[in-house]
Amino acid sequence: MKFIKNKGDRNALLFYLGSLVSIFGTTIYTFAISLYTLKMTGSSVSFSTTLILSIIPIIILNPIVGVMVDKFNKKKLVVTANLLNGIFLVIIYLISNWKGLSIGIIYLSTFVINSINIIFDVSIDSSIPNIVSKEKIVNINAGNRIIDSISSVLGPVFGGIAFAIFDIEFFILINSISFLLSAILDTLIDFKYNTNSELEEKQDKRITIGNLNYFKEIAEGFKYLISKRYIVEILALFIIVNFFISFSVTIPIPIILNNILEIPAKSFGLIQGAIPIGMIIGAFMVKKIIAKYKLNSIFSVTGIIMSVNIILLSIPLFINNINNINVYVIYYLLIMIFMGICVSLVDIPFSYTMQTNIEEEFRARSLSLTISIVKVVVPISYLISGVLLQNIEAYIVILFGGITVLIVSIIFYKYISKK
């Protein structure tokens, strides 16, 4: 990496490589282990349990991890998290070769890996302002979004192909290697490129003392977060929009496409993959948009565009004379691409806002608390949507969600225009 003279650019490249190796390896592994569970048990409950175990740690552990990241050396946490995951999977690999994989081991490994991943995610996300200059923060967030989106599209594809060729032990070994390789790349990143030296000294002392009161620290982080009115206003919009996207898109759309319109499975997969593609497009657009418009305007206008897309999802349910299934596929494909673009135009500026407006001493706690709050509303929206869909038509659920997002976004736009 010495051929790259600028240390910030070198940090960014190492960050991308480490994220690509780790995220792509994990995506393939998660998809493969879920398929293996379904094949081994034949139970959709076991299959869904594996996926749920990847979400629960995020909700429960994020605030605690946020405290750790604020108080301890971020580089050590990033490298240690990858090393722990790599070593843990090597142990699972040896156990699987010795005794085979039981459903209990699969559940345990899923929970442990995702729990350790939280340490990595919060540490690296809160470190972004420290490893590049402020001017490059949007770039590195956009690049990370692109890597994540590409992995979500190609991970299941490669995972499905490899699952048909190799045994599950191979996946475990490959993922352990990906974590260890990512740890090596992370050791080369300079986490002190743009950092607070006084805070770093405090962190080192607290590592020696080890006297953390997690509940007190979380409370302080929450108190700090709500004191930032600008952040709270954006977070409120973010939570509401996220709730109604889950409510009116995530649950109803599979039902509409599979059960009502009877779109083939391959076409359904193509439509589902359109959102990450849109997110990649949005990631390439976001820097120019942030440079041209105020963040508040971006959030509110994107919310309005998102609401229109949600409402458009219900239109085919009012039209009964289209016999060509490809028309539906293209229609929903285009909407999902636009939805993905909107997600990037909200997520990346929101991350940028958090990273640049929160003091470093509270940054990890603030980031982790917002993630937990957002994640908590998702299962609630799933539950409400699922119950409603058993009693009313799907288009009503979609329209209600889309109109609500539209009203909230317009109110937010008018509110910020007066300030």
Image (cartoon, rainbow, N blue to C red):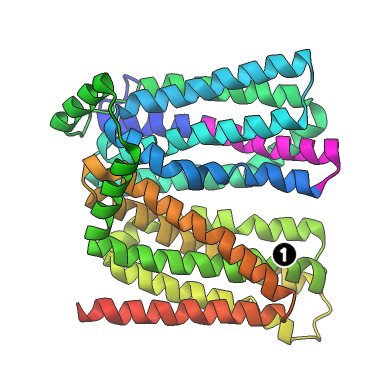
What element does badge 1 sit on? Answer: helix
Question: Percent position (x, y) of residue 234?
Answer: 33, 65
Task: Name the residue rendered at 24%, 64% in the picture.
Answer: 229
Above or below, comparing residue 400 to residue 203 in the picture: below
| Residue at the disc numbered 1 | 254
Task: Name the residue rendered at 36%, 43% in the picture.
Answer: 140
Which one is nearer the viewer's eye here, 136 or 239? 239
Q: Amino acid at mark 1?
A: Pro
Q: Quadrant of residue 64?
A: top left
Q: Quadrant of residue 227?
A: bottom left
Which one is nearer the viewer's eye here, 390 or 356? 390
Q: How many marks?
A: 1
The residue lying furthest to the left in this view is: 198
What range is drawn magenta here? 22-43
Could you tell me which quadrant the N terminus lies in?
top left
Mark 1 nearby-residue class (10 Å; few <14, some 14–19, many ≥20): some
What secondary structure characterizes most of the magenta part?
A: helix
